[in-house]
Amino acid sequence: KGIGNTAKRVKDQIFSLNGAMGALGAGAVMKSVIQSASGLESLRVRLKFLTGSTKDAGKAFDTMTGFASKVPFALEDIQKASPLLLTVTDDIDDLNGLLEMTGDIAAVSGLDFVKTAEQLQRAMASGIASADLFRERGVASFLGFEAGVTYSAEQTKTRLKEMWEEGTTTAKGATSELAK
């Protein structure tokens, strides 16, 4: 009887502890869901102001989620990178191309997706020389930019876009290969 009572108390304590752990887990899940929803809403607001309209913000958001569905990069990283890329694009329709370029360069260089987007944004806004990590990691050289030559922001942007549109860089398609 004594052993049975002790076993019952231990069992009750285990189930009590299990319930408490379950409640903590549920609380953590709820907190995560709320943070995700808050982050998405914050992103939608930023996109609205970066694109100039709710319609374009929605289009940019759809572009991001569509891109994320077919690449090996986290949606969260794509969401962090997209506003950076939107600052150097002339048109919402160009966002997908910039995301693909970012993914290809990230896949080849070993840089993470967000850092690659930061460097692309710098290069396209101020010239390839301002993309320090691209220079340090040899990415600028790999992409065909000569060391010591000054490239304006517009020259850098035009040259990068041409490389991807014409397929003249060996980095094109690296994201698709990595996804396999």
Image (cartoon, grey):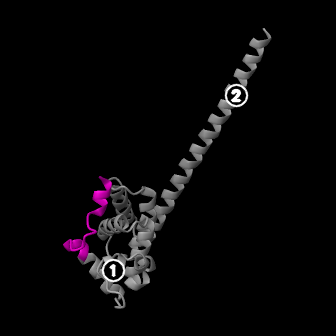
Q: What's the amino acid at mark 1?
A: Ser
Q: Which residue is mark 1?
A: 141
Residue most extreme to the left: 166
Instruction: Examine the rendered structure and indicate whether residue 25 appears above or below residue 175.
Output: above
Question: Viewer-proximal residue, 155 or 49?
Answer: 155
Residue most extreme to the top: 1
For the residues labelled 2 and 1, the Cα–Cα distance comes to 62 Å
Residue 165 inside the magenta-drawn segment: yes
Residue 92 is tagged as none
Structural crowding at the residue carrying mark 1, measured as other residues with C-alpha within 10 Å and reported as few (<14), some (14–19) or many (≥20): few
Magenta-highlighted residues: 163-180
Structural crowding at the residue carrying mark 2, measured as other residues with C-alpha within 10 Å and reported as few (<14), some (14–19) or many (≥20): few
Q: Which residue is mark 2?
A: 16
Res. 47 visible in picture: no
Residue ID at (69%, 31%): 17
Percent coordinates x, y for residue 27 in the rendering? 62, 42
**Which mark lies nearer to you, 2 or 1?**
1
Q: Secondary structure at mark 2?
A: helix
Residue 115: name its quadrant.
bottom left
